[in-house]
Structures are given as structure tokens and as C-alpha cells.
Image: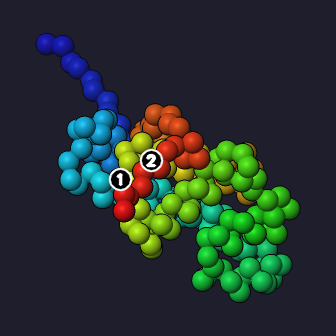
């Protein structure tokens, strides 16, 4: 009789607010939403809108987490931002705070920041105004741009190795997409 030895190991990824949202958004983009528009069902329109909104959430979470870290390690150094932090608009945090906290602004004329600015505006239209329509291409582009933007924001504030979610992206990879600044929007006919 031959003795067999088997060794197994289990590992898992510790998920937080960013990675939980990403895993759900990844599932929407890769499993739930069809590849082609002609394959869509009624639920796919609102799910595309949710994916766009979730994508913006990834960016907001990353930026506010980075700002919070700077404020925590430098108490009292940025009193104006500390005072405004709990009720700040994303626009203020994105457009003004990076230069105040790091000495360098985000250049919204280049990617990924160009796409993040357009994503912010479309997310606001979708969530607050006219429930703006979202195509499959827009939804997937939003997620791709948000992930790339989150990486850039984290590197901007934390330096190299500042983006802690590479293991999550490796386990749940995304295909490259058009930048959100290059994708065509769909609009309602009135």
C-alpha cells in the first residue's frame, strides 16, 4: 500500500470598502452585463447606471482615504481642509486639495484625470438630475477609468507602492477599455 501525502493551503484576500465595491462592480461588468447591446434585457440599463455610480464611488473612496491619511499624519497642518473634510464636495477634494496637500494638482488634461472629471459629471447627471442613460460601453469604460484613476490618485499621495489593491485586481482582472473621456454618451430623445 502506497502512502499519499496531500498538503493544501487556503488564502484569501482581505477586502475593505474599495475592494468590496470593486468585486461587485467587476461582477456586473464581466458576468452580468452582456457583451453586445442586442443581448440586453430591461435590467441591464439600470445595472449599467449602477456600475457607473459604483465606479465613481471607487474614485471618491480612494481620494478621501488618501486625504484622510495626510490629515491624520499632519494634525493641525491643514486646518481649512480638516474643517471641511466631513462635508466636502468631491469637486473640492479633487480640484483643490491635492495641490494644497501634496504641492501638485491633478492634471485634468491628461489621463486618467481627464476621464475622472468626465465620470464625475456624468455620475452627477445619473444620480441627481435626469437619470442619464448609460450604455454598456460607458459602464465598462467607467470602471476601467475609475480603477486606473484610483491607482494614480493613490500613487500621487502615497508614492510608489501606494495602491494596495493589486492582489484584488490580479484575482479579478479587467480588460482594457476606452478611457471614459473617449467614450460616446447616449442621450434621451426628447
Specify whether 13 is left or right of 104.
left
Residue under the image location 66 percent in, 50 percent down: 114
The residue lying toward the viewer, choosing from 117 and 81, is: 117
Tag 1 near tag 2, CB within 8 Å: yes
Colouring mode (rainbow / by chain / secondary structure / one colour): rainbow
Mark 1 vs 2, N-terminal side: 1
Relative to 176, residue 104 above or below? below
Q: Position of residue 96 (x, y in %)?
A: 76, 69
Residue at the right extreme?
A: 103
| Nearer-the-camera pick, 12 or 32 | 32
Binning the other alpha carbons within 10 Å of mark 1 as few (below 14), some (14 to 19) or many (20 upward) gives many
Q: Residue at x 54, y 47 (%)?
A: 180
Q: Secondary structure at mark 2?
A: helix
Closest to the observer: 40 or 157?
Answer: 40
**90 relative to 104, above or below:** below
Front residue of 56/162: it is 56
Q: Quadrant of the N terminus?
A: top left
**Which residue in the protein does label 1 denote?**
48
User: Circle 2 is placed at which residue position?
Assistant: 138
Query: How far apart are the two marked residues, 1 and 2, measured between alpha carbons?
Result: 8 Å
Q: Is residue 25 visible?
A: no
110 vs 48, left or right, is right
**Circle 2 Cα neighbour tier, 10 Å, few/some/many (<14 / 14–19 / ≥20):** many
Q: Percent position (x, y) of residue 165? A: 54, 48
Residue 171 in view, yes or no: yes
Q: Residue at x 51, y 43 (%)?
A: 183
The quarter holding residue 74 reads bottom right
Q: Which residue is depicted at the point 79% across and 84% down?
A: 79
Amino acid at each position: 500500500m502506497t502512502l499519499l501525502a496531500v498538503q493544501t493551503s487556503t488564502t484569501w484576500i482581505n477586502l475593505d470598502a474599495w475592494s468590496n465595491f470593486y468585486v461587485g462592480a467587476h461582477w456586473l461588468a464581466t458576468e452580468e452585463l452582456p457583451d453586445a447591446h442586442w443581448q440586453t434585457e430591461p435590467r441591464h440599463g439600470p445595472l449599467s447606471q449602477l456600475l457607473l455610480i459604483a465606479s465613481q464611488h471607487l474614485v471618491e473612496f480612494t481620494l478621501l482615504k488618501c486625504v484622510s491619511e495626510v490629515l491624520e499624519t499632519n494634525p493641525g497642518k491643514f486646518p481649512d481642509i480638516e474643517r471641511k473634510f466631513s462635508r466636502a464636495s468631491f469637486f473640492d477634494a479633487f480640484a483643490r486639495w491635492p495641490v494644497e496637500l501634496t504641492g501638485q494638482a491633478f492634471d485634468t488634461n491628461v489621463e486618467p484625470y481627464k476621464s475622472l472629471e468626465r465620470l464625475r459629471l456624468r455620475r452627477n447627471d445619473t444620480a441627481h438630475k435626469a437619470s442619464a442613460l448609460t450604455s454598456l460601453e460607458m459602464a465598462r469604460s467607467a470602471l476601467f477609468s475609475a480603477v486606473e484613476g484610483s491607482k494614480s490618485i493613490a500613487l500621487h499621495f502615497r508614492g510608489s507602492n501606494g495602491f494596495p489593491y493589486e492582489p484584488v485586481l490580479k484575482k479579478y482582472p479587467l480588460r482594457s477599455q476606452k478611457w471614459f473621456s473617449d467614450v460616446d454618451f447616449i442621450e434621451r430623445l426628447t
